[in-house]
Image (cartoon, grey):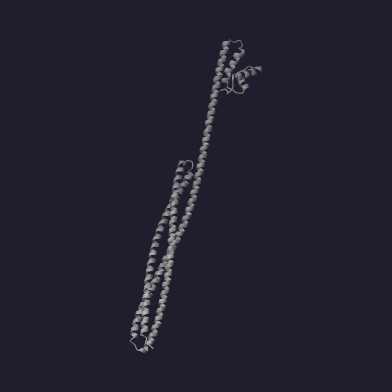
Amino acid sequence: MARIGVTYLDIAQAAEAVKGRGEEPTVDRVRAELGTGSKSTIAPLLKRWRSETGNQADTGGMPRDLVEALRALHDRVQQEADRKVEEAREGFEATAEKHKREREEARAATAGLEDEVRSLKHKLEISEEQNRKLKSAQEESQAALNKSEFQREEGSVRIAELKATVEELKQENRDIRDHFEHFQQRAADDRQHERDQFRLTNEQLKGQIADLAEQLSEADRRLTEREETGDRQQEIIATLETENQHLRQQVSGYRTEVETLKERHIDHAEEIAAKAAEISVLHDKVTSLSSHNASVSKEAELLRQSLGKVELELNSTRDRVILLTDENRAILQEKAVIQGQFKQLENSLRESLPSE
């Protein structure tokens, strides 16, 4: 095909230039002179220039009709050859353009796949980092749970010790009551003795009263210590409840993180399934991550069960403390009764003493 702008005037000027050099103006020579244009375009314009200018090639004595026929045949053959060459060139350019587009599309697809792979790798690194943080937090929670368990056991031991102390105090109170009853009997017998033995008996009774007073003071001191120990136990229980609440909050946070990880794992699985042929290695890592998430879920469930057991034990400990508080209250009431009996005894002794 001719370049836009190649006209008959261009062909005529090129043919005149070729002829001016002493050469026969042919299609190839005119085309070389112009430096552009196709032979199918140049041939009819060159033929027109020859017919208008009367510049016909030397026929060598052959008939003009034969020469015209041969020239027409040559022009048709030349045009057909030019057409086939042009078609082949256009086909080659189209094929080359198609291959170029395919290469660009392949490059774009490769770049997209590389971006997706990098994105998946980045997401996987983030997920692994979150898993490491979750594992660290779980280890801290386990340590806190172990500490809470140790404190609970220590509280149980203290409660057992306090209970033993209360039993000892009860036994001492029973001994005091028995001794006091025996003292009352002796006082009744002593009042029947002669007046010269009364003062000696009175001194003995005063000594016994002093001993009983010391015993009551000791009992009061022990009760005070028992009350302080009960207060410390209440503080320990409050601390355990606070730690239990904190552990519950941590377990709730762990559950939320595990659910988030599960959702992210599902998204990752869908993306990896679409690119399974290109990123099979990442698929294996995500499968491993799924197993780890399941293990973390099981561990969180075990932790929740352990917290439930701790809560039950804390409730049991609270009930024991309430029971011990009631026992302390009963002991205080018994102490008040004993003190009242001592006052009555002192009043009786004052009344029974002979006046000077």
Horizontally, residue 230 falls left or right of residue 106, namely left
Look at the image and tell me in which quarter the C terminus lies: bottom left
Q: Residue furthest right?
A: 21
Residue 316 in percent (x, y) is at 38, 63
Against 186, is 260 above or below? Answer: above
Residue at the far front: name it: 356
In the figure, residue 14 lies in which quadrant?
A: top right
Query: Across the whole image, how many numbered discs are drawn on residues?
Result: 0
| Quadrant (top left/top right/bottom left/bottom right) for the N terminus | top right
The answer to which of 52 and 268 lies nearer the viewer is 52
Q: Residue 254 versus residue 25: which sits nearer the camera?
A: 254
* x and y, in percent, of residue 163 in the image: 39, 69
Left or right placement of residue 192 versus residue 222 in this view: left
Residue at 45% of width from left, 45% of height from top? Answer: 267
Q: Is residue 42 left or right of residue 183?
A: right
- Residue 154: quadrant of the picture: bottom left
